[in-house]
Image (spheres, rainbow, N blue to C red):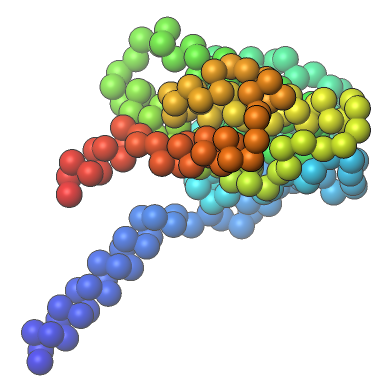
Amino acid sequence: MKKISFLFFALLTFQACQSQEIKPQVPPEFRKFVNDVLIDTVGFTREFPKPPAVTDEVLVELQREFKDDSTKYYFEQLSNRNLKVRREYEKPFKYLSNYHHTITLLALSVHSDPDIRVFALKTLNSTIRMRVMVCAQQVTYDQFDKDDVVITHFLLHVLESNPLFIAGSENATIHQIYITSILHVLDLATKENIVNGEDLRVWYKNDLQYEQAVLQWKNHKFPANKVKEEKK
């Protein structure tokens, strides 16, 4: 009986440790800081679908990237409060791209300002493409692989929270560019090359084709996943 109790206790301890590893804690003040930058509190862009909030998986990686004070500073400069003073995107995005802070760019892909959302995704696209030119230690390439997992998970979440098309003229065009950019980044992060760089309206044929693409991105086997499988 004692042996069974001990095994039961060990199992509970293992599950608790596993749970802690899978769901790290995000400090409430950090979550608030990020949301204060990203979320529109005044209904400035009501004509566009409301983007989802960043997930805990993204917030955990943001904490890592924000250890660089300049990254945190430039992120904050893109808040609605600061944008009322000036709309200078180039410097913050150039810095984030140069230092390959792809998770910060990912978070900005759900900024309340549609222009920033699109700009963030286009910069994320070019940043991932530039990786082939990076000469670094293996730990950096391993981090790129981990980032791609987070990028794919979150952008699939964003896709599921948005309609593919919206009504209107200019707004519909901006939203189409936004969704197209998401599809392109998903192709880059997974290397599936499903959309092949095409515009959404050119590539999209029907719902079945789209659902099959989403399923393929969801089922993609990342290098990080392969390592876990080898250890089992």
Furthest residue to the top? 133
Could you say which quadrant of the image residue 72 lies in? top right
Residue at 78 percent of width and 46 percent of height: 50
Residue at 59 percent of width and 29 percent of height: 183
Residue 73 x %, y %: 66, 30
The answer to whether residue 92 of the structure is visible from this angle is: no
Residue 181 x %, y %: 65, 25
Furthest residue to the bottom? 1
The answer to whether residue 130 of the structure is visible from this angle is: yes
As drawn, is 46 to the left or to the right of 193? right
Which quadrant of the figure contains the N terminus? bottom left
Residue at 48 percent of width and 57 percent of height: 25
Could you say which quadrant of the image residue 140 lies in? top left
As drawn, is 96 to the left or to the right of 37? left
Residue 91 x %, y %: 70, 15
Residue 221 x %, y %: 35, 36
Which is more toward the observer, 20 or 167? 167
